[in-house]
Amino acid sequence: MLGTKAAGASARDLPALAAWVSLTNALINLDELITKGCDVIERVWRPRVLVLPIAAVIIVGLVAFKLSQPPRQSLTAILDERRPAPKFLALDSDNKLVKIERYLGRQEVLLIFFDGEAGADRDTVLLRARQQFPELKRRGVQVVGVSATIPQYNRQAMERGGKFPFPLLSDPEFLIHRLWGRYNEDRLETQTGVFWIDRAGQVAWSGKSPRPEADLDRLLPPLKESSLSKAK
């Protein structure tokens, strides 16, 4: 009797036991899935977690480098830099002392460094300025020529090619040429160039000296054929 009852009880417990086993297996599988999922998440996020501090170090380094560098001027700012025009005085063709200061801050000045040995009467820039002088004068622009020749040579040039309605100054000791960056110390020779001084007495600047104008046609129209023939 007892064996029969025990057998009956075991038979009744089988479904419950099977359910318990299934639940246990399910939990084990779930645990394995969770473990695998955690491994995947760790593999994915571990590099990202490492990237953040590395990126922070790089950014801090770049900021520190930027702050340690001196401020740079843009190319436009450099080209647009203007400073007070260097002042000077010199003798004109009539041996009269002329001060450039008399024009600065009052009117615009077109300052022309020319080759005095070739002669003012053969310098195309001076001839262009003479041709355009009525218009320049109407606009209130003062023209000044400078060369390394003595006043006598400038007078001889005007005897050959006609007078100039603006002063031609002499700088035989190259003081003005050096002041305006128109003397080549290596070759020991003067250089030509044209400078535009604005009404405020400011001139374009580059490095240690004023910067000559690159676009001469913007300041002076080309010579007419008749004037060019006379220059030759």
Image (cartoon, rainbow, N blue to C red):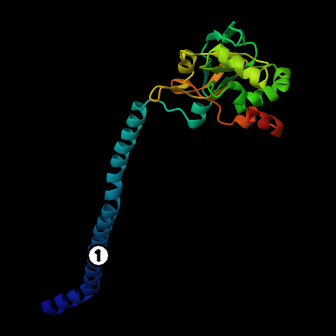
Q: Quadrant of residue 74?
A: top right
Name the image quarter holding the C terminus: top right
Residue at (67% x, 9% y) in the render: 99
In this rendering, is residue 209 above or below 47?
above
Tell me where residue 33 appears, x and y as whole percent: 31, 72
Name the image quarter holding the N terminus: bottom left
Q: Is 168 placed left or right of 49 in the picture?
A: right
Q: Quadrant of residue 76?
A: top right
Q: Nearer the viewer, residue 48 or 81?
A: 81
Tell me where residue 58 appears, x and y as whole percent: 36, 44
Q: Is 137 placed left or right of 38 in the picture?
A: right
Residue at (48% x, 26% y) in the render: 188
In this rendering, is residue 218 above or below 17?
above
Residue at (25% x, 86% y) in the render: 14
- Total numbered labels placed on residues in the image: 1
Neighbours of disc 1 within 10 Å: few (<14), some (14-19), many (20+): few
Q: Is 18 placed left or right of 189 in the picture?
A: left
Q: Is 207 placed left or right of 147 in the picture?
A: left
Identify residue for label 1. Answer: 29
Q: Nearer the viewer, residue 19 or 91?
A: 91
